[in-house]
Image (spheres, rainbow, N blue to C red):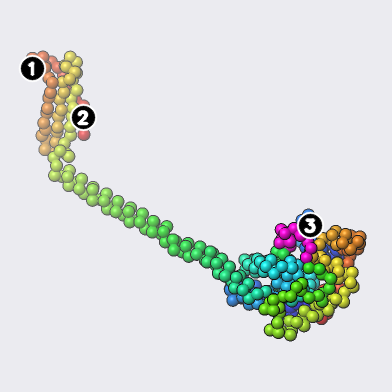
Amino acid sequence: MISDEQQDQAALYALGLLDADEDAAFESELRANAELRDLVREMREASGDLALTAPSVLPPASLKQRIMGELALETKRVVPMPTRRASFGWIPWAIAAALAVFCGLLALDRVRLERQLAQIRAVDPLMQTTFYTLAPSAPAPADAKATVAWQPGRQSGVIRISNLPAPQSVVGSRCRAQGSN
Amino acid sequence: MAETSTAQQMLDQEMIARIGRRDQSAFSALYDRLSGPLYSLAMKMLGDPAEAQDALQDVFLQIWSRAATYDPAQSSVFSWTVLLTRSRVIDRLRARGRRSRVVVASTEETPTGAPDASTVESAADTAEKNDEVARVRNVLTNLPSEQREAIELAFFEHLSHHEIAARLGQPLGTVKARIRRGLLKLRQRLNNL
């Protein structure tokens, strides 16, 4: 059952005469009352029909052209968006493909470099040589130095000694070997 | 409803659904069907062709952008578009800050000033449409004058119930009751047509 007061509010609501607070309060009432919603719809239809009682005047034909022109402009503004998305949609895929190719090239390059290194090691005797630096022990001179280059595969090597004192003062001195590759 | 038969309402809803899917031909057809009554309403409320045309343009662009949100459970397409039109017109009235417009003294009145012959509804309008308009006008005219007056002041001049009470020198409760009874009677009689 809808009260007279609710009917009054429904009529004012249908005509858009309620203020913001009244409007919000009535809408919450509407949500809970199907019968009231039906009444509002009926009143809204009745008020809609009131528009037909206005003296009949047609808009100029140019207005339709103007509106259709606006519509076309709006469509142009809206339509390019998906087109733009579509035209640039390949970019992430291209980046992924480029990265995959780049990784493949890096792998191939690594294999190639490893082969080259192996070949160089096989050909260049220096690559298979172990170097030792011999540090002097007291009372040998601090700037005395001995370097040993040793090739285990050939069981041969070279020793380079520098800054040693005269042979008589070397007697009795000992050397400690420090190995490095 | 008086303005639109059930079949016409279904056609209107179909057109709105197509507009919601960005169908310009449906939009064009709906414009052809509704621009006359909506423009007439805007003209009656604003009394200025340029403003009425701007308002109508706003309304149809709103129809284009909001068609997908139209809810047939709340109103017919025609009533929905009338609602949009009144809303746009009221915005303009508020912006312009004046309320003195076309006097709604009688539903039989002619438009203020001599309208451009090219814009007056012509014989191209269907007899059926004119019949509908005549029926609604007849029903409204036959409402008790105090109810009709209150409804017209609210609908066309967008006076609040407080302003109508002041204008008519009647208590607020009386004005509310007149509007309510008038709308209910209008609805009942239009349904019986």
Q: Magenta stretch containing residue B97, yes or no?
A: yes
Residue B12: image location, x then y, percent: 68, 76
The span shown in magenta is B90-101
Which one is closest to the eye, mark 2 or mark 1? 1
* Structural distance between the alpha carbons of marks 2 and 1: 25 Å
Q: Which residue is mark 2?
A: A179
Which one is closest to the eye, mark 3 or mark 1? 3
Within 10 angstroms of label 2, few (less than 14), some, or many (20 or more) residues? few
| Left or right, A153 with reference to B134 | left
Q: Which mark is residue B81?
A: none
> Which residue is found at the position 74% from the left and 61% from the top?
B93
Within 10 angstroms of label 1, few (less than 14), some, or many (20 or more) residues? few
Mark closer to the chain start, 3 or 2: 3
Q: How many marks?
A: 3
**Residue at the extreme front of the image, as rendered:** B114
Locate the C terminus of chain B and report the quarter of the image it occupies: bottom right
Q: Which residue is mark 1?
A: A167
Foreground of the two, A76 or B152? B152
* Structural distance between the alpha carbons of marks 3 and 1: 117 Å
Name the residue type under label 3: Asp
Name the residue type under label 2: Gly
